[in-house]
Image (cartoon, rainbow, N blue to C red):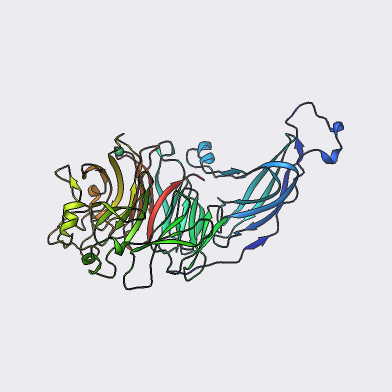
Amino acid sequence: MKKKILASAVLVTITLMVMLGGCNRTDAGLSDSDAGLSDIGVGLSDITVTLNPSGFLPLTARLDFSTRRPARVTVTVPGKGGPEGEGEKALNTWTRTYPVGTSHKLNIMGLYAGSTNTVTVQALGDDGLVETKTVEITTAPMPEYFPDYELSVVQPEQMEPGWTLVETVSGAYTVVLDYNGDIRWYTRSRMFALSKERFIVALNSSDTEWGEVDWTGVVHQRYHLPMGIHHDAITLPNGNLLAASALPRDTINDVIIEYDKDTGEQVRVFDLREFFPQEYVAYDPNWAHNNSLWYDESDDTLIVSLRTLSMVVKLAYPTGEVKWALCGDYDYVSPEWKERYLLRPLNADFRFQVAQHAAMKLDDIDNNPDTIDIMLFNNNAPATQSRLPTSEYPYLGTYSEGRHVRINEKNMTVEDVWAYGREMGTKYYCSALSDANRYSGTGNYLLTFCRGMSNGEVVCELTRDKQTVFELQIDAAGGYRSDRIVF
Ligand SMILES: [Ca+2]
Ligand SMILES: [Ca+2]
Protein backbone atom coordinates (compact mmCIF):
# COMPACT_ATOMS: atom_id res chain seq x y z
CA MET A 1 0.00 0.00 0.00
CA LYS A 2 2.68 2.45 0.91
CA LYS A 3 5.39 1.39 -1.44
CA LYS A 4 7.40 4.35 -2.57
CA ILE A 5 9.80 4.62 -5.34
CA LEU A 6 11.99 7.60 -4.77
CA ALA A 7 14.36 6.99 -7.56
CA SER A 8 17.34 9.22 -7.49
CA ALA A 9 17.12 11.95 -10.06
CA VAL A 10 18.61 11.00 -13.32
CA LEU A 11 20.82 13.58 -14.87
CA VAL A 12 20.32 13.46 -18.55
CA THR A 13 23.06 15.08 -20.48
CA ILE A 14 21.40 17.23 -22.97
CA THR A 15 20.29 16.01 -26.26
CA LEU A 16 20.14 19.32 -27.88
CA MET A 17 19.06 20.43 -31.27
CA VAL A 18 19.49 24.01 -32.27
CA MET A 19 16.56 24.87 -34.46
CA LEU A 20 17.13 28.57 -34.72
CA GLY A 21 20.72 29.29 -33.93
CA GLY A 22 20.54 32.95 -34.85
CA CYS A 23 18.44 35.79 -33.62
CA ASN A 24 15.12 36.95 -34.91
CA ARG A 25 15.06 40.69 -34.86
CA THR A 26 11.70 41.86 -33.58
CA ASP A 27 12.54 45.49 -32.97
CA ALA A 28 13.30 48.03 -35.63
CA GLY A 29 16.16 50.40 -36.16
CA LEU A 30 19.00 48.41 -34.59
CA SER A 31 21.55 46.93 -36.92
CA ASP A 32 24.48 44.65 -36.24
CA SER A 33 26.85 47.55 -36.69
CA ASP A 34 25.27 49.44 -33.77
CA ALA A 35 26.87 47.10 -31.26
CA GLY A 36 29.58 44.50 -31.09
CA LEU A 37 28.32 41.19 -32.52
CA SER A 38 28.96 39.38 -29.25
CA ASP A 39 26.57 41.69 -27.41
CA ILE A 40 23.70 41.16 -29.79
CA GLY A 41 20.92 38.78 -28.97
CA VAL A 42 19.85 36.75 -26.01
CA GLY A 43 22.90 34.55 -25.78
CA LEU A 44 21.12 31.35 -24.84
CA SER A 45 23.62 28.84 -23.46
CA ASP A 46 23.52 25.07 -23.81
CA ILE A 47 20.63 23.55 -21.86
CA THR A 48 21.13 20.82 -19.27
CA VAL A 49 18.11 18.58 -18.69
CA THR A 50 17.48 16.76 -15.42
CA LEU A 51 14.62 14.31 -15.76
CA ASN A 52 12.45 13.81 -12.66
CA PRO A 53 14.49 16.12 -10.39
CA SER A 54 12.18 15.58 -7.40
CA GLY A 55 12.42 11.79 -7.68
CA PHE A 56 8.63 11.30 -7.52
CA LEU A 57 7.35 12.86 -10.77
CA PRO A 58 8.73 10.90 -13.74
CA LEU A 59 7.09 13.14 -16.37
CA THR A 60 8.70 16.36 -15.13
CA ALA A 61 12.14 17.80 -15.81
CA ARG A 62 14.34 20.74 -14.92
CA LEU A 63 16.09 22.83 -17.56
CA ASP A 64 19.27 24.64 -16.47
CA PHE A 65 20.82 27.29 -18.70
CA SER A 66 21.82 30.93 -18.80
CA THR A 67 21.22 33.89 -21.06
CA ARG A 68 23.70 36.69 -21.63
CA ARG A 69 20.95 39.27 -21.30
CA PRO A 70 18.01 39.22 -18.91
CA ALA A 71 15.37 37.20 -20.75
CA ARG A 72 11.79 36.09 -20.30
CA VAL A 73 11.69 32.39 -21.18
CA THR A 74 8.70 30.41 -22.41
CA VAL A 75 8.90 26.62 -22.44
CA THR A 76 6.44 24.57 -24.49
CA VAL A 77 5.79 20.83 -24.46
CA PRO A 78 3.76 20.40 -27.64
CA GLY A 79 0.58 18.34 -27.42
CA LYS A 80 -0.53 15.67 -29.83
CA GLY A 81 -3.54 16.41 -32.00
CA GLY A 82 -6.82 14.78 -31.05
CA PRO A 83 -9.82 13.68 -33.05
CA GLU A 84 -10.94 17.30 -33.48
CA GLY A 85 -7.68 18.41 -35.13
CA GLU A 86 -5.58 21.47 -34.46
CA GLY A 87 -7.77 22.90 -31.69
CA GLU A 88 -7.24 19.74 -29.69
CA LYS A 89 -3.50 20.04 -30.15
CA ALA A 90 -3.50 23.38 -28.37
CA LEU A 91 -5.58 21.94 -25.52
CA ASN A 92 -2.98 19.21 -25.07
CA THR A 93 0.02 21.55 -25.12
CA TRP A 94 1.73 22.48 -21.86
CA THR A 95 3.39 25.89 -21.82
CA ARG A 96 4.67 28.31 -19.19
CA THR A 97 6.41 31.69 -19.18
CA TYR A 98 8.89 32.23 -16.34
CA PRO A 99 10.13 35.42 -14.62
CA VAL A 100 12.89 37.47 -16.28
CA GLY A 101 16.46 36.50 -15.40
CA THR A 102 19.86 35.46 -16.71
CA SER A 103 20.30 32.23 -14.72
CA HIS A 104 17.39 29.91 -15.49
CA LYS A 105 16.40 26.81 -13.49
CA LEU A 106 13.01 25.95 -14.90
CA ASN A 107 10.86 23.04 -13.78
CA ILE A 108 8.54 21.73 -16.47
CA MET A 109 5.81 19.06 -16.63
CA GLY A 110 3.55 17.48 -19.21
CA LEU A 111 6.07 15.15 -20.88
CA TYR A 112 4.67 12.09 -22.61
CA ALA A 113 5.77 8.74 -21.15
CA GLY A 114 7.82 6.35 -23.26
CA SER A 115 8.53 9.09 -25.80
CA THR A 116 11.16 11.47 -27.03
CA ASN A 117 9.58 14.85 -26.33
CA THR A 118 10.73 17.79 -28.42
CA VAL A 119 10.50 20.72 -26.01
CA THR A 120 10.80 24.32 -27.18
CA VAL A 121 12.68 26.95 -25.16
CA GLN A 122 12.06 30.49 -26.36
CA ALA A 123 13.96 33.36 -24.75
CA LEU A 124 12.87 36.97 -25.23
CA GLY A 125 15.78 39.27 -24.33
CA ASP A 126 15.46 42.76 -22.90
CA ASP A 127 16.64 44.03 -26.28
CA GLY A 128 13.53 42.58 -27.90
CA LEU A 129 15.36 39.79 -29.68
CA VAL A 130 14.12 36.23 -29.46
CA GLU A 131 16.23 33.09 -29.50
CA THR A 132 14.73 29.62 -29.68
CA LYS A 133 16.23 26.20 -29.04
CA THR A 134 14.68 22.79 -28.78
CA VAL A 135 15.71 20.00 -26.45
CA GLU A 136 14.76 16.37 -26.84
CA ILE A 137 13.80 14.67 -23.58
CA THR A 138 13.30 10.92 -23.59
CA THR A 139 11.13 9.41 -20.86
CA ALA A 140 10.67 5.82 -19.70
CA PRO A 141 7.42 4.00 -20.50
CA MET A 142 4.61 3.90 -17.91
CA PRO A 143 5.05 1.19 -15.28
CA GLU A 144 3.23 -1.92 -16.44
CA TYR A 145 0.83 -2.21 -13.53
CA PHE A 146 -0.89 1.08 -14.33
CA PRO A 147 -4.50 0.50 -15.42
CA ASP A 148 -6.04 1.39 -18.76
CA TYR A 149 -7.67 4.80 -19.00
CA GLU A 150 -10.32 5.04 -21.68
CA LEU A 151 -11.94 8.33 -22.58
CA SER A 152 -15.38 7.49 -23.86
CA VAL A 153 -16.76 11.06 -23.99
CA VAL A 154 -14.75 14.31 -24.43
CA GLN A 155 -16.50 17.54 -25.38
CA PRO A 156 -13.90 20.23 -24.67
CA GLU A 157 -16.12 23.22 -25.52
CA GLN A 158 -18.64 22.19 -22.86
CA MET A 159 -16.22 20.89 -20.23
CA GLU A 160 -14.80 22.65 -17.22
CA PRO A 161 -11.37 23.66 -18.64
CA GLY A 162 -8.22 21.79 -17.71
CA TRP A 163 -6.61 18.40 -17.51
CA THR A 164 -8.05 15.72 -15.26
CA LEU A 165 -6.33 14.65 -12.03
CA VAL A 166 -7.29 11.20 -10.77
CA GLU A 167 -6.02 10.42 -7.26
CA THR A 168 -5.65 7.00 -5.73
CA VAL A 169 -5.84 6.58 -1.98
CA SER A 170 -2.83 4.29 -1.73
CA GLY A 171 -0.65 6.33 -4.06
CA ALA A 172 -0.24 3.27 -6.25
CA TYR A 173 -1.05 5.35 -9.31
CA THR A 174 -2.16 8.96 -9.43
CA VAL A 175 -2.31 10.52 -12.86
CA VAL A 176 -3.14 13.65 -14.83
CA LEU A 177 -4.72 13.00 -18.21
CA ASP A 178 -5.00 15.52 -21.04
CA TYR A 179 -7.96 15.90 -23.42
CA ASN A 180 -6.74 12.89 -25.43
CA GLY A 181 -6.61 10.69 -22.35
CA ASP A 182 -2.81 10.64 -22.54
CA ILE A 183 -1.01 10.56 -19.20
CA ARG A 184 1.01 13.80 -18.81
CA TRP A 185 1.93 13.57 -15.14
CA TYR A 186 1.99 10.77 -12.62
CA THR A 187 3.34 9.76 -9.26
CA ARG A 188 3.62 6.53 -7.33
CA SER A 189 3.84 8.31 -3.98
CA ARG A 190 0.90 8.96 -1.66
CA MET A 191 -0.41 12.44 -2.35
CA PHE A 192 -3.39 14.72 -1.80
CA ALA A 193 -4.22 17.75 -3.91
CA LEU A 194 -4.24 20.83 -1.63
CA SER A 195 -5.41 23.39 -4.16
CA LYS A 196 -5.28 24.06 -7.88
CA GLU A 197 -1.61 25.01 -7.46
CA ARG A 198 -0.17 22.64 -4.89
CA PHE A 199 -0.31 19.10 -3.58
CA ILE A 200 1.23 17.34 -0.62
CA VAL A 201 3.24 14.18 -1.09
CA ALA A 202 4.82 11.58 1.18
CA LEU A 203 8.61 11.82 0.94
CA ASN A 204 9.44 8.63 2.81
CA SER A 205 8.07 5.12 2.99
CA SER A 206 6.77 5.47 6.55
CA ASP A 207 4.64 8.51 5.57
CA THR A 208 6.10 10.74 8.28
CA GLU A 209 7.84 13.27 6.02
CA TRP A 210 5.71 15.26 3.58
CA GLY A 211 6.45 17.91 1.01
CA GLU A 212 4.18 20.67 -0.22
CA VAL A 213 4.92 20.75 -3.90
CA ASP A 214 3.73 22.47 -7.08
CA TRP A 215 2.78 20.34 -10.06
CA THR A 216 6.19 20.75 -11.71
CA GLY A 217 7.88 19.24 -8.65
CA VAL A 218 9.31 22.26 -6.79
CA VAL A 219 9.16 21.51 -3.06
CA HIS A 220 7.97 24.66 -1.24
CA GLN A 221 7.75 23.37 2.35
CA ARG A 222 8.47 20.22 4.30
CA TYR A 223 6.35 18.92 7.16
CA HIS A 224 6.95 16.21 9.73
CA LEU A 225 3.71 14.34 10.52
CA PRO A 226 4.48 11.54 12.99
CA MET A 227 1.12 9.86 12.23
CA GLY A 228 0.90 10.69 8.52
CA ILE A 229 -2.18 11.89 6.62
CA HIS A 230 -5.15 9.58 6.26
CA HIS A 231 -7.84 11.07 3.96
CA ASP A 232 -7.37 14.75 3.19
CA ALA A 233 -5.29 17.90 3.65
CA ILE A 234 -6.06 21.50 2.72
CA THR A 235 -4.42 24.91 2.75
CA LEU A 236 -6.00 27.39 5.15
CA PRO A 237 -6.59 31.00 4.05
CA ASN A 238 -3.47 32.03 6.03
CA GLY A 239 -1.41 29.51 4.04
CA ASN A 240 -1.01 26.98 6.85
CA LEU A 241 -1.49 23.28 6.23
CA LEU A 242 -4.45 21.47 7.80
CA ALA A 243 -4.12 17.69 7.68
CA ALA A 244 -6.44 14.86 8.64
CA SER A 245 -4.03 12.96 10.85
CA ALA A 246 -3.97 11.09 14.15
CA LEU A 247 -2.56 10.86 17.65
CA PRO A 248 -1.00 7.71 19.07
CA ARG A 249 -4.10 6.54 20.95
CA ASP A 250 -7.03 4.14 20.86
CA THR A 251 -9.22 5.90 18.27
CA ILE A 252 -8.40 6.63 14.63
CA ASN A 253 -9.37 9.07 11.86
CA ASP A 254 -10.54 11.72 14.34
CA VAL A 255 -7.70 14.26 14.63
CA ILE A 256 -6.94 17.30 12.48
CA ILE A 257 -3.56 19.04 12.83
CA GLU A 258 -2.52 22.50 11.65
CA TYR A 259 1.09 23.21 10.57
CA ASP A 260 2.79 26.57 10.07
CA LYS A 261 3.43 27.35 6.41
CA ASP A 262 6.75 29.11 7.11
CA THR A 263 8.37 26.89 9.72
CA GLY A 264 6.63 23.58 9.03
CA GLU A 265 6.02 23.31 12.78
CA GLN A 266 2.80 22.06 14.38
CA VAL A 267 0.48 24.95 15.37
CA ARG A 268 -2.47 23.16 16.96
CA VAL A 269 -4.32 19.89 17.29
CA PHE A 270 -8.04 20.05 16.51
CA ASP A 271 -9.31 16.94 18.23
CA LEU A 272 -12.80 15.87 17.14
CA ARG A 273 -13.15 13.78 20.29
CA GLU A 274 -13.44 16.97 22.32
CA PHE A 275 -16.43 18.28 20.38
CA PHE A 276 -18.66 15.22 20.06
CA PRO A 277 -20.75 13.34 22.64
CA GLN A 278 -18.77 10.57 24.31
CA GLU A 279 -21.40 7.99 23.30
CA TYR A 280 -20.45 8.61 19.67
CA VAL A 281 -16.77 8.10 20.49
CA ALA A 282 -17.37 4.96 22.53
CA TYR A 283 -19.03 3.18 19.57
CA ASP A 284 -15.87 2.09 17.77
CA PRO A 285 -12.17 3.04 17.47
CA ASN A 286 -13.12 4.36 14.01
CA TRP A 287 -16.17 6.20 15.39
CA ALA A 288 -15.74 9.28 13.16
CA HIS A 289 -13.78 8.17 10.10
CA ASN A 290 -13.39 11.77 8.99
CA ASN A 291 -12.74 11.62 5.25
CA SER A 292 -12.78 15.25 4.12
CA LEU A 293 -11.86 18.80 5.17
CA TRP A 294 -13.30 22.03 3.83
CA TYR A 295 -12.62 25.45 5.33
CA ASP A 296 -15.38 28.08 5.10
CA GLU A 297 -13.57 31.40 5.11
CA SER A 298 -16.81 33.39 5.39
CA ASP A 299 -17.31 32.42 9.03
CA ASP A 300 -14.09 30.58 9.97
CA THR A 301 -15.60 27.16 10.20
CA LEU A 302 -14.52 23.71 9.19
CA ILE A 303 -16.82 21.29 7.37
CA VAL A 304 -15.95 17.65 8.03
CA SER A 305 -17.42 14.41 6.68
CA LEU A 306 -17.79 11.77 9.40
CA ARG A 307 -18.47 8.57 7.53
CA THR A 308 -19.19 6.20 10.40
CA LEU A 309 -21.84 8.61 11.73
CA SER A 310 -23.21 9.42 8.20
CA MET A 311 -22.85 13.01 9.29
CA VAL A 312 -21.46 16.18 7.68
CA VAL A 313 -20.75 18.70 10.43
CA LYS A 314 -19.82 22.37 10.47
CA LEU A 315 -17.62 23.39 13.42
CA ALA A 316 -16.15 26.76 14.35
CA TYR A 317 -12.38 26.72 13.92
CA PRO A 318 -10.52 26.44 16.21
CA THR A 319 -13.07 26.46 19.07
CA GLY A 320 -14.97 23.41 17.78
CA GLU A 321 -18.41 24.89 18.48
CA VAL A 322 -20.92 22.90 16.41
CA LYS A 323 -22.99 24.97 13.92
CA TRP A 324 -25.07 22.26 12.27
CA ALA A 325 -25.07 18.56 11.40
CA LEU A 326 -26.38 17.20 8.11
CA CYS A 327 -27.59 13.80 9.30
CA GLY A 328 -30.76 11.73 9.55
CA ASP A 329 -32.75 11.40 12.77
CA TYR A 330 -31.00 8.11 13.58
CA ASP A 331 -31.12 6.20 16.90
CA TYR A 332 -27.48 6.93 17.73
CA VAL A 333 -27.81 10.71 17.40
CA SER A 334 -27.92 12.19 20.90
CA PRO A 335 -31.18 13.90 22.03
CA GLU A 336 -29.31 17.18 22.49
CA TRP A 337 -27.96 17.03 18.94
CA LYS A 338 -31.42 16.20 17.56
CA GLU A 339 -32.72 19.28 19.33
CA ARG A 340 -29.92 21.70 18.49
CA TYR A 341 -27.94 20.72 15.41
CA LEU A 342 -29.87 18.48 12.99
CA LEU A 343 -31.11 20.18 9.82
CA ARG A 344 -34.77 19.79 8.87
CA PRO A 345 -35.44 18.69 5.25
CA LEU A 346 -37.65 20.94 3.14
CA ASN A 347 -38.53 18.57 0.32
CA ALA A 348 -40.73 15.62 1.33
CA ASP A 349 -38.65 13.04 -0.57
CA PHE A 350 -35.34 14.17 0.98
CA ARG A 351 -33.16 11.17 1.88
CA PHE A 352 -30.19 11.80 4.17
CA GLN A 353 -26.81 10.64 2.88
CA VAL A 354 -25.19 7.55 4.40
CA ALA A 355 -21.44 6.82 4.76
CA GLN A 356 -20.62 9.81 2.55
CA HIS A 357 -17.32 11.24 1.27
CA ALA A 358 -15.85 14.52 0.09
CA ALA A 359 -18.08 17.30 1.44
CA MET A 360 -17.26 20.67 -0.13
CA LYS A 361 -18.83 24.11 0.15
CA LEU A 362 -19.87 25.70 -3.14
CA ASP A 363 -20.09 29.35 -4.10
CA ASP A 364 -23.21 31.36 -3.29
CA ILE A 365 -25.34 30.15 -6.20
CA ASP A 366 -28.74 31.47 -5.06
CA ASN A 367 -27.58 34.94 -4.03
CA ASN A 368 -28.81 34.34 -0.52
CA PRO A 369 -26.22 34.81 2.25
CA ASP A 370 -28.33 32.73 4.66
CA THR A 371 -27.89 29.60 2.58
CA ILE A 372 -24.78 27.59 1.78
CA ASP A 373 -24.61 24.95 -0.93
CA ILE A 374 -22.81 21.71 -0.18
CA MET A 375 -21.62 19.04 -2.61
CA LEU A 376 -20.88 15.54 -1.38
CA PHE A 377 -20.64 11.96 -2.55
CA ASN A 378 -23.33 9.82 -0.97
CA ASN A 379 -21.97 6.27 -0.92
CA ASN A 380 -25.28 5.11 0.57
CA ALA A 381 -23.58 2.10 2.12
CA PRO A 382 -25.20 -0.32 4.59
CA ALA A 383 -24.19 -1.36 8.07
CA THR A 384 -20.78 -2.82 7.31
CA GLN A 385 -19.65 0.72 6.41
CA SER A 386 -22.18 2.80 8.33
CA ARG A 387 -24.26 2.22 11.45
CA LEU A 388 -27.49 1.62 9.53
CA PRO A 389 -28.96 -1.83 8.75
CA THR A 390 -30.62 -2.55 5.39
CA SER A 391 -33.51 -4.13 7.32
CA GLU A 392 -34.52 -0.62 8.36
CA TYR A 393 -33.18 1.27 5.33
CA PRO A 394 -33.73 -1.00 2.32
CA TYR A 395 -32.40 1.54 -0.22
CA LEU A 396 -28.86 1.26 1.20
CA GLY A 397 -26.44 -0.42 -1.18
CA THR A 398 -28.74 -0.01 -4.18
CA TYR A 399 -27.10 3.15 -5.61
CA SER A 400 -24.55 5.90 -4.91
CA GLU A 401 -24.78 9.51 -6.00
CA GLY A 402 -23.12 12.88 -6.32
CA ARG A 403 -25.36 15.14 -4.29
CA HIS A 404 -25.82 18.92 -4.19
CA VAL A 405 -27.89 20.25 -1.28
CA ARG A 406 -28.70 23.73 -0.02
CA ILE A 407 -28.59 24.48 3.71
CA ASN A 408 -30.31 27.49 5.24
CA GLU A 409 -28.15 28.12 8.30
CA LYS A 410 -30.62 30.62 9.74
CA ASN A 411 -33.67 28.36 9.53
CA MET A 412 -31.64 25.14 10.02
CA THR A 413 -33.18 23.53 6.94
CA VAL A 414 -31.81 21.53 4.01
CA GLU A 415 -33.15 20.84 0.51
CA ASP A 416 -32.08 18.94 -2.60
CA VAL A 417 -30.71 20.89 -5.54
CA TRP A 418 -29.19 18.25 -7.83
CA ALA A 419 -28.09 14.63 -7.72
CA TYR A 420 -26.83 12.00 -10.12
CA GLY A 421 -26.28 8.30 -9.61
CA ARG A 422 -29.54 6.91 -8.34
CA GLU A 423 -30.73 6.46 -11.93
CA MET A 424 -27.67 4.25 -12.59
CA GLY A 425 -28.61 1.82 -9.79
CA THR A 426 -26.15 -0.81 -8.58
CA LYS A 427 -24.03 -0.34 -11.73
CA TYR A 428 -22.64 2.87 -10.19
CA TYR A 429 -22.81 1.77 -6.56
CA CYS A 430 -19.62 2.49 -4.57
CA SER A 431 -19.38 1.15 -1.04
CA ALA A 432 -16.30 3.29 -0.31
CA LEU A 433 -14.13 6.20 -1.51
CA SER A 434 -15.42 8.36 -4.44
CA ASP A 435 -15.87 12.08 -4.96
CA ALA A 436 -18.16 14.84 -6.22
CA ASN A 437 -17.25 18.38 -7.30
CA ARG A 438 -19.15 21.27 -8.79
CA TYR A 439 -17.40 24.10 -10.68
CA SER A 440 -18.82 27.57 -10.57
CA GLY A 441 -17.49 28.61 -14.01
CA THR A 442 -19.43 26.08 -16.07
CA GLY A 443 -21.80 24.91 -13.35
CA ASN A 444 -20.75 21.37 -14.31
CA TYR A 445 -20.40 18.44 -11.92
CA LEU A 446 -17.37 16.12 -11.92
CA LEU A 447 -18.22 12.82 -10.22
CA THR A 448 -15.89 9.93 -9.39
CA PHE A 449 -17.53 6.55 -8.93
CA CYS A 450 -15.02 4.07 -7.44
CA ARG A 451 -16.98 0.93 -7.99
CA GLY A 452 -14.60 -1.66 -6.62
CA MET A 453 -12.42 -4.43 -7.93
CA SER A 454 -14.72 -6.01 -10.49
CA ASN A 455 -16.33 -2.90 -11.97
CA GLY A 456 -13.48 -0.40 -12.09
CA GLU A 457 -13.91 3.31 -11.82
CA VAL A 458 -15.87 5.94 -13.76
CA VAL A 459 -15.11 9.67 -13.75
CA CYS A 460 -17.85 11.65 -15.45
CA GLU A 461 -18.64 15.31 -15.95
CA LEU A 462 -22.27 16.31 -16.32
CA THR A 463 -23.99 19.56 -17.05
CA ARG A 464 -26.80 20.71 -14.82
CA ASP A 465 -29.30 19.03 -17.17
CA LYS A 466 -27.27 15.81 -16.89
CA GLN A 467 -25.71 15.83 -20.32
CA THR A 468 -22.43 13.87 -20.13
CA VAL A 469 -19.61 16.01 -21.54
CA PHE A 470 -16.70 13.88 -20.28
CA GLU A 471 -16.47 10.25 -19.30
CA LEU A 472 -13.38 8.31 -18.30
CA GLN A 473 -13.39 4.56 -17.64
CA ILE A 474 -10.58 3.17 -15.50
CA ASP A 475 -9.88 -0.49 -15.49
CA ALA A 476 -8.83 -0.77 -11.81
CA ALA A 477 -9.86 -0.51 -8.21
CA GLY A 478 -8.34 1.79 -5.63
CA GLY A 479 -9.26 5.16 -7.12
CA TYR A 480 -10.24 7.91 -4.73
CA ARG A 481 -11.19 11.29 -6.17
CA SER A 482 -10.63 13.53 -9.17
CA ASP A 483 -10.47 17.17 -10.14
CA ARG A 484 -9.98 19.43 -13.14
CA ILE A 485 -6.80 21.51 -13.04
CA VAL A 486 -5.46 24.17 -15.40
CA PHE A 487 -1.67 23.82 -15.60
CA1 LIG B 1 -26.43 31.05 -0.73
CA1 LIG C 1 -13.77 16.85 -4.17
Q: Is residue 278 left or right of residue 56?
A: left
Residue at the front extreme of this rendering = 319
x, y percent for residue 148:
43, 57
x, y percent for residue 226:
45, 69
**Quarter of the image where one finds residue 307:** bottom left
x, y percent for residue 147:
43, 60
**Quarter of the image where one finds residue 319:** bottom left
Nearest the camera: 392 or 307? 307
- Residue 252 can be seen in this image: yes
Q: Is residue 464 left or right of residue 31?
A: left
- Total residue callouts: 0
Nearest the camera: 186 or 440? 440
Nearest the camera: 412 or 326? 412
Image: 479 above or below 438:
below
**Quarter of the image where one finds residue 71:** top right
Q: Is residue 256 left or right of residue 144?
A: left
Q: Is residue 348 left or right of residue 104?
A: left
Quarter holding ligand 1: top left
Residue at the left extreme of this rendering = 392
Residue at the top extreme of this rendering = 29
Which residue is drawn at the image coordinates 45% and 54% (left, top)?
193
- Residue 474 can be seen in this image: no
Which residue is drawn at the image coordinates 51% and 41% (left, top)?
91
x, y percent for residue 446:
36, 46
Q: Looking at the rendering, in which quadrant would you find the N terminus?
A: bottom left
